[in-house]
Amino acid sequence: MVESTTNPTTTLWNTILPMIIQDVEDEELHVGKFSLKTSIVTVSADQPAKRSLFGFKAHQASQSCFFCLSTGTFHKLGGSSKKVNTTEANYFVELSERSEVRSRDGTILDSEQGVNGFGDTPARIVQLIMPYDTPIDMLHNFGEGLCEVIIRELFGRGAPKSGMFHVEIDKLREAINEIVLPSQFSEIENCRNGTDKLAFFRLTLLSVAIRFEILNPHARFAIIAISMLANKMCASGVGPELFDEQLCSAAQWFLQENSNEYLSCKAHELLFHLPDANRLFKNVAPLSTFSFESSYQYALMGFSTRMTRNFSETVCSRALIHNSIRQEVFRRAHSNPSPSFLQFLTLTKGVVSRQSPYKNLITSKLDGEDRIVIGGSDIYGTLFLGCGTLVSEYQDSYTSNDVFFAKKRNGEQECCRFVGVVEMDGECFALSEPFRELPASKQFSSLMRAQSQASNSTENQLLLTIQLIENPERLNELDFSIQYANKPNNFMIGDTLPAWTREYRILRRLARKRWLEEEMITVGISIEEIKELDDLEEELTVEEVRMIDGIMTVQEIL
């Protein structure tokens, strides 16, 4: 913790960093029979802290993205392309990524010279960690970034960037009231902090977007794409890299079709660079600042930089003592705890795991469809799991905690209703009733209608987003339409993935070019956008792209 009247400067971080390196780098620790060696590998932080640490310019400055050299200021689009000469031909390739354009030595030189997004003060951290080798912070970029922007527009708070998320607020609240979530999420609608905002968006608003037709199609599919990205990371979901690539592209497409103003620095990092960050770290969610935010807010509670004497020592002492006490409580709980200590543990939920995973004996008679032969064993109505608590309707008739997803022993996955829990032969079994899946023709019927309402310019994005919802884990085949929705081309995912990525990049360029041309005719475009249109036309010419009767053809078969 750093005590300062303003945000710590790069100079301050340069002074502190050698002490941190000395304490952490190449240190050897011994815990029981284990030997550990520590090393600093990356940095997780919100935008202001990260910028001061790495000596970057403000987020609205040109080329100030940590991951690329986008020249955008308040609104950052994709980084600019570079023309590369080869022995065969001149062609355009995307060389806007810092890791490709500048590499390690170039980035260190940029920091020393204060160019390409860096400020005037060289940062010592760049000698140790590259800015593009850091995770994207899910709490601030999702919860307190793009999600918060959309939530504010949905509820009419502040000036909207477009009419994309306009909705009758009374109808929106009615729809929200129909969404049933586990009780642990009962307060998220208040959006007290970034964690609540993210949960409200990825659970409640996602459900509204899938189920109700009160939003326009662009808004629905943008919310769905962003929420599915967040849910995959929050649940540690495993899927192909294509999942992140497609969902980010879809969200970016819908937002940019309505207004470039949605692409702030935080949104830009998510929509353009999250796939690479997840590829590097597997999943950036566990590396985000959720736990740190909670921990330091607790440590600061009741203290004031103006009123508290020896503020830093007082706050740090509380944090250190709190962590030490938690470790000691955990140790004693597993070392023959006394009756009085066990009583104490009942008041400190979450510090140690429960000895018994279930409680609350069901005394009422089960309904006919729930009765099974269990050899006279008792049935309990509450089951404690690491991901939450299941409560049977026989324990609480108003429960919202009796629906769960499970993987059976044969590997099949099901959505089930929790009936109760029984212990037989030393094993704990959950009694459950599986939900019956709707026929494929009736699934996502509301979304299918939204697809038919969409304009031809976004038909392809809508189609692909729907397919990822239907089968997010196994993308063996995509109906990838580059013409019209009623003329799909089956495209197999496999060794052809790099080619597919190239063709999809071309498709995005075509859509952007079309949008700019329409804007130029109707309302006019800026000088910057005119230059972008010229660059797009030149790039597509080099790629040998042709449009024949609305059908895109390139030099390779799609």
Image (spheres, rainbow, N blue to C red):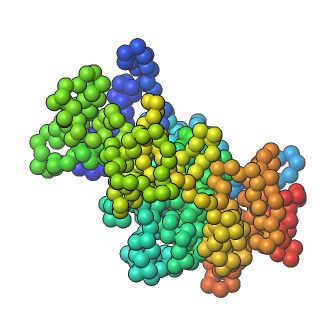
Does residue 207 appear anywhere in the picture? yes
Q: Is residue 314 left or right of residue 208?
A: left
Quarter containing the C terminus: bottom right
| Residue nearer the viewer, 167 or 265 | 167
Relative height, residue 145 to residue 533 (above, below): above
Residue 394 location (% of width, % of height): 37, 55
Relative height, residue 474 to residue 466 (above, below): above
Residue 137 location (% of width, % of height): 46, 49
Does residue 144 appear anywhere in the picture? no
Relative height, residue 289 to residue 159 (above, below): above
Residue 117 location (% of width, % of height): 51, 51
Q: Residue at x 70, y 68 (%)?
A: 441
- Which residue extends farthest bottom? 522
Quarter containing the N terminus: top left
| Residue nearer the viewer, 91 or 495 | 495
Q: Residue at x 19, y 35 (%)?
A: 344
Q: How many marks?
A: 0
Q: Residue at x 46, y 39 (%)?
A: 375
Q: Residue at x 33, y 45 (%)?
A: 361
Residue 377 location (% of width, % of height): 41, 39
| Quadrant housing residue 348 | top left
| Residue nearer the viewer, 12 or 558 | 558
Q: Is residue 459 left or right of residue 279?
A: right
